[in-house]
C-alpha cells in the first residue's frame, strides 16, 4: 500500500468556480481543478504523492492519516 492511500481524496463540483476541485483534507486543500472529474482525481493523486515526498525530503512528519475515518458515511448524514 502506498502512503498516499492513508489520505482521503475528494473531488467535487464547485458552482462558484464552475469546475471540479480536488483536495486531500489534512494534507492538500484546493490542490487542483479542471473540467474533467477523472483527470482532476488523477492529478490530485499525483499531487498527494508529491506532497508526501516533499515531507520526507524535508524530514517533516506527515499529518495524521485521514483514511479510515468513515468520511463517506459522515458526509451522507449531512445530505
Image (tube, rainbow, N blue to C red):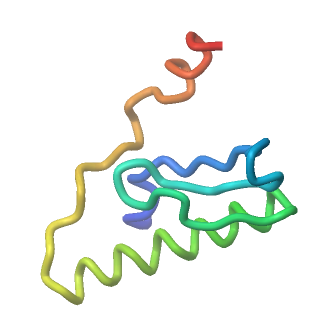
Q: Can you give x and y, in whole percent of width and height, for residue 49 in the image? A: 46, 74
Furthest-front residue in view?
16
Q: Is residue 39 left or right of residue 8?
A: right
Residue under the image location 57 percent in, 13 percent down: 78
| Quadrant in which the C terminus appears | top right
Q: Is residue 15 left or right of residue 53?
A: right
Q: Can you give x and y, in whole percent of width and height, for residue 3 in the image? A: 37, 65
Q: How many marks?
A: 0
Q: Can you give x and y, in whole percent of width and height, for residue 69 in the image? A: 38, 31
Residue 51 occupies which quadrant of the picture?
A: bottom left
Tell me: residue 61, above or below residue 59. above
Furthest-right residue in view?
35
Residue under the image location 42 percent in, 52 percent down: 7
| Quadrant in which the N terminus appears | bottom left
Tell me: residue 79, above or below residue 55. above
Q: Can you give x and y, in whole percent of width and height, for residue 36 in the image? A: 86, 62
Tell me: residue 48, above or below residue 9. below
Q: Is residue 40 left or right of residue 48?
A: right
Residue under the image location 57 percent in, 10 percent down: 77
Q: Is residue 67 left or right of residue 60?
A: right
Residue 43 occupies which quadrant of the picture?
A: bottom right
Given residues 45 and 20, the one toward you in this image is: 20
Amino acid at each position: 500500500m502506498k502512503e498516499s492511500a492513508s489520505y482521503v481524496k475528494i473531488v467535487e463540483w464547485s458552482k462558484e468556480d464552475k469546475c471540479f476541485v480536488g483536495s486531500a483534507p489534512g494534507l492538500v486543500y484546493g490542490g487542483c481543478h479542471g473540467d474533467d472529474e477523472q483527470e482532476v482525481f488523477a492529478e490530485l493523486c499525483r499531487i498527494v504523492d508529491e506532497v508526501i515526498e516533499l515531507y520526507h525530503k524535508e524530514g517533516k512528519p506527515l499529518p495524521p492519516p485521514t483514511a479510515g475515518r468513515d468520511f463517506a458515511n459522515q458526509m451522507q448524514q449531512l445530505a
